[in-house]
Amino acid sequence: MLGVDVFYCGALMLCWTRLCVALHVSHGQPLIPAHDPEMTDLHAASSTETGDGLEIKNHAPHHEPCFVDNILAALREAVGNGGELTNRSLTLFGICTATGDPSGSVLLELTNEASRNGLEALHPAAVHLSEEDERGALKLTFDLEQSPLLERKPVLLLAFKSPLSGGNLDIMFTSQSLQPNTQPVCISGETQYMVLTGKASEDNAHQNWRVSADTKSPDMKQRLRDVLTGGKSGSSISLIPLLLFSGGRGTDTRHVHGSGSSQTSSFLCELKRFLGDVMPQGQPESPPLQLTSLQSMPPLTLGVSSSETLLAGLINSSALTIFSFSTCCSVSQVHRRELALSPALAEELGQRLEQTMMQITEVIREEDVGHRATERLGRLRELSAFPKEEPATGESQYRAFLLLRALQTVARTYVLKRGQRTARAGPSNPGGANICGLRSLTVSLERHLLAPNTANIDNCQGTCPVPLVNPTNHAVLLNSHIESERAASRSADERPPCCVPVAYEALEVVDFNEDLTQVRPFENVVVKECGCR
């Protein structure tokens, strides 16, 4: 049964300074009939559990924001300054260093080839899982639709959707479709991808790859099954397969540089990674809070029709900004995201962005936020830069605006963090006197959809001795009444003045919907000032 080729040529062309990928997605009918009780199918439309097998859903990139873009970033960062794979990248891609695993050289070649000619990618239409034999080995069957890409030598990349748990595991993959036929993979808690080298096909016919997965130790059979399927305990771990092909057609990459919408997708994914690197993280055990329980003001739409007053207000706003990536950055998303700033406002935006960029560069240098933050900030600067000799395009204005709001949030967070450190260590606070004042409070948000995934909303704590901190007349009279009752040896039943928030700032959430961008203001979220009331 032959499938139907559907190519989204140029639907996603992700371009970096040195790494470009042209993504072609193929969808079709499953090769193995659904009534086969031995098989567990992966289909893009549904997911069911049958017997001991758990269906692993096939994910196209638009189902997982930044899925392919994150792979590009991992490939780009796999090579160190000396041109060799770093130890972290070997672990990240499951390369077995002790066995002379040839996958290491394949990964290095893939990264180098990507920088020269680009990569192309193909998604299997379906993946099936079954018990292979009485030895307990598992068989993964990849249903590959007809495609001329298969005439090249592919690299099968298996991405773990969620972080792995448990100890280390050595897996041996065997298949006539692999070259060499048997290839090892060594995974640990830091592994996110597995890399297998495939064999080029003699034609582009519909193919069916059958890959056996086994372990050396019989005691690790269940662990292997849990890794490949997510386990029976409800774990969300699953595999997302992707075939990568080097030797991309150079003539196609000219579309990459001309696609502003795909540059914007790359920018948004890079922004998400940058915020994850540079922003302070909440406690891992803290359950993420849902913003859906908050009441918001009517959303403000960002686009070419946005008023100058609205855009000027947002550029000058000091509100904490959170970005919602739940529907952004998909393969099929072709909507152009643009602003239409006046020359004066565009100049103001550029100046503010440059000033804030310098501030964040200092933060990265002084705070322990990791070396990648500087590299990612540089890429964000490139993707949002205004042309020097001509007016800024609407899409570059859009990206510069978002970058400014993100960097303003980063700067604000570290200014508060430094101020609170100084207050705790200052001579005016001997012994850490617990007087009513602002205290840092960071809450965790939905980790996979929002960036930053924490918000510093602060809180008020401390006692209210005389003189009261920022009191109202009512609090002054209340405190005087309580003190006079105590002086007369009488019991006062009224509560004393308490340290509470008296001024707030808003939280703004930027939503990237499929056809528009909106800013949702949530008032009275971030504590700005405390008082005794």
Image (cartoon, helix red, strand yellow):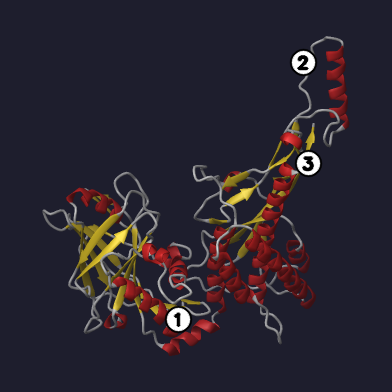
Q: Which residue is mark 2?
A: 493
Closer to us: 489 or 13: 489
Label 3 amino acid? Pro
Q: Which residue is mark 1?
A: 115
In the image, residue 122 sits, relative to residue 317, either above or below, namely: below
Closer to us: 423 or 53: 423
Q: Quadrant of residue 133?
A: bottom left
Disc 1 versus disc 3: nearer the observer: 3
Q: Earlier in the sequence, mark 1 or mark 3?
A: 1
Q: Earlier in the sequence, mark 3 or mark 2?
A: 3
Confirm whether residue 55 shows in the render. Answer: no
What's the CA distance linking mark 2 and mark 1?
75 Å
* Left or right relative to 380: residue 240: left
x then y, percent, for residue 425: 72, 43
Question: Which numbered disc covers residue 427?
Answer: 3
x then y, percent, for residue 394: 66, 76
Q: Residue at x 42, y 63 (%)?
A: 88
Label 2 close to label 1 by CB (< 8 Å): no
Q: Quadrant of residue 488?
A: top right
Quarter of the picture containing the N terminus is: bottom left
What's the CA distance linking mark 3 and mark 2?
37 Å
Disc 3 versus disc 2: nearer the observer: 3
Categorize mark 1 by other alpha carbons within 10 Å: few (<14), some (14-19), many (20+). some
x then y, percent, for residue 257: 53, 83
Label 2 amino acid? Asp
Question: Which numbered disc covers residue 150?
Answer: none
* Left or right relative to 376: residue 29: left
Categorize mark 2 by other alpha carbons within 10 Å: few (<14), some (14-19), many (20+). few
* Left or right relative to 284: residue 311: right
x then y, percent, for residue 510: 62, 59
Q: Earlier in the sequence, mark 2 or mark 1?
A: 1
Q: Residue at x 49, y 87 (%)?
A: 254
